[in-house]
Each structure stands twice: as structure tokens, then as C-alpha cells.
Image (cartoon, rainbow, N blue to C red):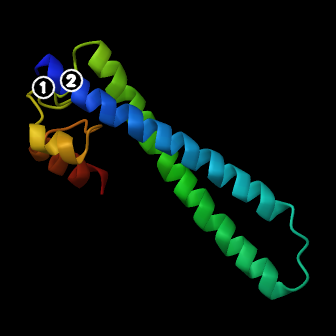
Amino acid sequence: MRENELRYFEEILDNRKEQIVKNIYGVEKELNELRGLELNDEGDFASVSNNNLVETAIGNQQELELGEIEMALMKIKDNLYGICEMCEEDIGFQRLKVKPHAKYCIDCREIAEKNNS
């Protein structure tokens, strides 16, 4: 991959990382606020419990994505970015544009998804 392409993806990954960190901080803040509420009836409790579950799920998903982004950034530094972890072929530029932290090429992604289900 050319240097300008690497810088392009590095900038995208850095921006997404920054956004996720802000989101995670916001989720943690909101969860702390929900925990501090005085609940007067079962309806309030159910509502807060539901919000807590949703916020926790969103936070967990964002933390997973953050880990994938950090791995992709390390691969850029190690000149391994854009190489499929399964077949070791190049991951297509268009795939990386859609998912800059992709670990697999499109063919290997399908194999990995079948093995995980």
C-alpha cells in the first residue's frame, strides 16, 4: 500500500478512535447518572434498567471497535496494514474504505463469520 493511502486510513482511524473515546466517556457518564437516580415506582425502575442495558451494550460494542482500531493503527506503524490475517493477501481498498479496521479480506471474512456462527 502506498504511503499516501496509509496516511489516509491512519487519519480516518484516528478520527474514529477519538469519536469512540468521546462516546464511551458519554456512555459511562450517563450510566453513572442513571445509577444515581432515586426511583419512585416500578415504571421508573424498568425504564432506567432498559436504558442501562442499551447503554451498556452500546459501550461494549464501541470498546470492541476501539480495540480493532488500535490494532489497525499498530499495523500501520508495523507496515502490516491492509493484509488479511487469514490468507495474507491484500485487503481491497474499497473494503478498507468501508471498514478501515478490517482484519480480513472479503472472502476470508465470510469464512470467519461462518466459523463463528
Q: Residue at x 11, y 44 (%)?
A: 94
Q: Amino acid at mark 1?
A: Glu
Question: Which x, y percent locates residue 61?
Answer: 48, 51
The residue lying toward the viewer, choosing from 53 and 12, is 12
Q: Which residue is mark 2?
A: 6
Identify the element where label 2 is drawn: helix
Looking at the rendering, in which quadrant would you find the C terminus? bottom left
Which residue is the extreme one toward the top? Answer: 78
Please state which of the two labelled residues, at mark 2 or mark 1, is closer to the viewer: 2
The answer to which image quadrant residue 71 occupies is: top left
* Left or right, 66 with reference to 83: right
Against 34, is 1 above or below? above
The residue lying toward the viewer, choosing from 96 and 10, is 10
Against 53, is 40 above or below? below
Rounded to the nearest angstrom, the CA distance separating label 2 from label 1 is: 18 Å
Q: Residue at x 12, y 34 (%)?
A: 91
